[in-house]
Image (cartoon, rainbow, N blue to C red):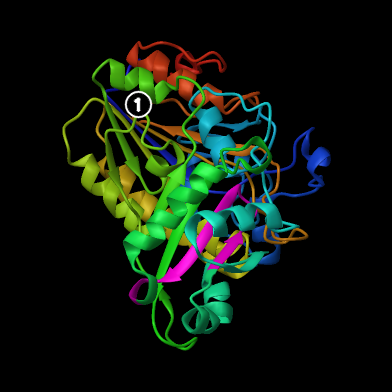
Amino acid sequence: MKFKRIFLIVIDSVGCGYTSKSHLYGDKGANTLSNIAENGGGLNIPVMQKLGLGNLTDIKGCPKTEKPLGVVCKLDELSVGKDTMTGHWEMMGLEITNPFKTFTDTGFPQELLDELTNQTGYEFIGNISASGTEIIKDLGEEHLKTRKLIVYTSADSVLQIAANEDLIGLEELYRVCEKAREITLKDDWKVGRIIARPFVGDSKDNFKRTTNRHDYALKPFGKTVLNSLEEHHLATIGVGKIGDIFDMEGIQETYKNTSNHNGMEHILNILDKDFTGLCFANLVDFDALYGHRRDVLGYKACLEEFDKDLACVIDKLKDDDLLIITADHGNDPTWHGTDHTREYVPMIAYNKNLTGKTLDPRRSFADLGATIADNFDVEMPKIGKSFLDELK
């Protein structure tokens, strides 16, 4: 069975239970889906329930089904780490053996900030792990008075710089971020992404981030399945932050999201296009808006909204389309701290002609990339095992 188009949707941070490696990260007991359902009064996700999501872990409101419509399994992570880039890069065939640098607990070294000041002429305030909207509210007025730029990080391997568009200007903010990218290529400071975070407003009551965000990511260190698809003149379409995660390596076309719902609207529009290849989407609201903020009810509502949008996507799938839903890590909002959680992630594969079943857990996210490469008869990744033959 071969498919003309594959739609791979990453529901960012929707983990489905701790693994044999979770204790190494302090995450034994974490289960994003199960704990949201238990603490949120149950999940109303009938589409994913029928596909077989409840077969992967106990989910209040989403019971197991003997005859799932999809082929489902849990995916373990082979790489070291539990961040966005690690998860996505492994999906496309790269094993990360040295984790990307994070500065969640300590902030960035003063030596790094001093070097950034020397090369840009700006001083910096903040230097903590924080929500972008909250730190702008807290420090935005000081930034307006002093012209000092706001620097912060998160649980991911990122260095983010926020500045007021009217005060500093977009091109100047981008210049500073480009310098930060150069500086953080040093091994001790090598973060995955530098992110420019422009905002507007003149007080904490009306500060608002704009859509002029710009990411400066590391390039993948090896060939990915995306590169192989592109070499064979097959479509590679990114939705959400996929283009940023891969620094556009192997991505030919990209659509930015303003929300999960907007990302699903992009996918619905792409479904109307005639192409052969991959549409690779990331929906980040689960993680950014609710997981890190430990908002159980917000996360629950986000899952239920996605389930409704998913019904519309499934309705538009053609007979030779394959839909795959997965995640890149966990982010259990009932867990301690605000970091990601090392968990299994779900894999749901659906086509109108598949016979639904539950497979044994897979040892690597790279099985996704291997399956995609197998389907399109392109070079197989160095890691991962295709499950294409099991989609029957």
Q: How dense is the environment of label 1, judged by Cα within 10 Å: few (below 14), some, or many (20 and up)?
A: some
Name the residue at 48% across, 18% down.
Answer: 370
Among the 4 quarters of the image, the one containing residue 191: top right
Quarter holding the C terminus is top left
Q: Position of residue 323 (x, y in %)?
A: 38, 35
The foreground one among 194 and 22 is 194
Say whether residue 268 is left or right of residue 20. left
Name the residue at 75% across, 36% down.
Answer: 19
Q: Is residue 36 magenta?
A: no
Q: Is residue 158 magenta?
A: yes
Say whether residue 115 is left or right of residue 171. right
Whether residue 7 appears in this view of the structure is yes
Name the residue at 59% across, 25% down.
Answer: 359
The foreground one among 102 and 224 is 102
Q: Position of residue 204 (x, y in %)?
A: 50, 86
Which residue matches tag 1? 353
Main SS, magenta region, reads strand
> For the magenta stretch, what is the residue range?
150-166
Q: Position of residue 17 (x, y in %)?
A: 70, 43
The foreground one among 29 and 113 is 113
Q: Position of residue 312 (x, y in %)?
A: 31, 51
Among the 4 quarters of the image, the one containing residue 242: top left
